[in-house]
Image: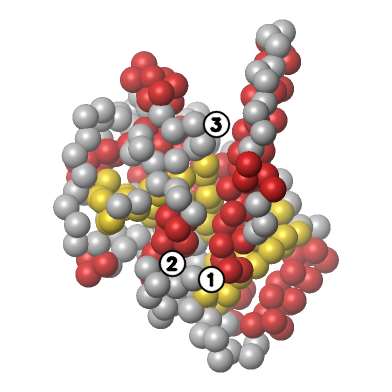
Amino acid sequence: MPERRHPGPAMTHHTPSRPQAPLDQASGLRRLFGPARRCLLPVVANPFLPDVQAVLELLSAALAAQGRQVLVVDAAGTAPLPQEITRLDLAAGVERLHGRVSYLAARGLPLAYVDTRGCAAAFVDAAFDAAPASDVVLLHADPTDLARMLGQRAARPLLLGSEGIESIKQTYAGCKLLVQRCALMTFDLLLAARPAQVRVDAIVERLCSCADTFLGAVVRDFAVVDPLADPLAAQDADLARVLGAQLLQDESVRRQHALRTATRSGAPPARRQADPRATASY
């Protein structure tokens, strides 16, 4: 994010993480005693999106408004370069922006976590470990890097776009790459456009049609945000609905994974308590 938007001091951390061994004993303890709801929100970077940092601020502010502790991990090619120490200790690069939002400049860092099969999924765990109090990681990355980090993870990436032709083409290209590399077939869409833009509906309809016709993919929902809006004052019902469904979807996937793991191990599945948010309207 631009320097003018995050003047806050860097956070102080007591449990550093190591890029070469992110799955150490301390990592396991942090996951055991950390927040019960740890959600990943993958955001597909678009280099033709004007003022992408403002859009990330709007996203993080909307998540914070839902009561979440958010870590914005900016690993896109447009992100600031990380501090040198961050390559050895991700936690040292985490900056507190305000009460519920932290930021990590991570351009190029996922490559340090690529294993022999080309997967960088360990970077996601390392990001959560870098900010143990965060229960949502907003992972903003280019489609190729995002594909390495998601691997076989079930997710519904959030596509970014605007009214420009090159931006729209890039949005579709990012969707296509994730379909081909990760077999992900559902997406959400966030368009950055001024309210006066009358082409928004046509853009959304065209993107949805192309994703369905040529890729067999589905754009489940979309929202339009004004990148010039004040992120702390903006109250957008559509954006809140999209993000709320994203978080519920990620938690549902993790519950299903835990159930399958318990079934394979022969252990009885844990009794599920009713989630009061399941009846919430988004």
Residue nearest the viewer, comparing 223 with 105: 223
Q: Is residue 136 above or below residue 257?
A: below
Q: CA distance from mark 3 to mark 1?
A: 41 Å
Q: Of circles 2 and 1, which is in front?
A: 1
Q: Is residue 270 left or right of residue 80?
A: right
Whole-percent x, y for residue 11 in the image:
21, 44
The amino acid beneath tag 3 is Arg
As shown in the figure, which amino acid type bears the numbered disc 1? Asp
Nearer to me, 150 or 238: 238
Q: Nearer the viewer, mark 3 or mark 1?
A: 1
The answer to whether marks 3 and 1 mark residues whose Cβ atoms lie closer than 8 Å is no
- Nearer to us of marks 2 and 3 is 2
Give 106 or 232, whichever is nearer the viewer: 232
Residue occupying the point 44% across, 33% down: 35
State the separation of the CA atoms marked 2 and 1: 10 Å
Q: Give the quarter of the figure containing the C terminus.
A: bottom right
Mark nearer the N terminus (3 vs 1): 3
Q: Which label is found at residue 58? A: 2
Badge 1 crowding class, 10 Å Cα cut-off, few under 14, some 14 to 19, many 20 or more, is: some
Q: Secondary structure at mark 2?
A: helix
The circle on residue 5 is none
Task: Write down the residue under mark 1.
Answer: 236
Left or right of residue 160: residue 20: left
The percent position of residue 123, horizontal first and vertical second, equals 43, 37
The residue drawn where x is 22% and y is 69% is 4
Q: Which residue is mark 3?
A: 117
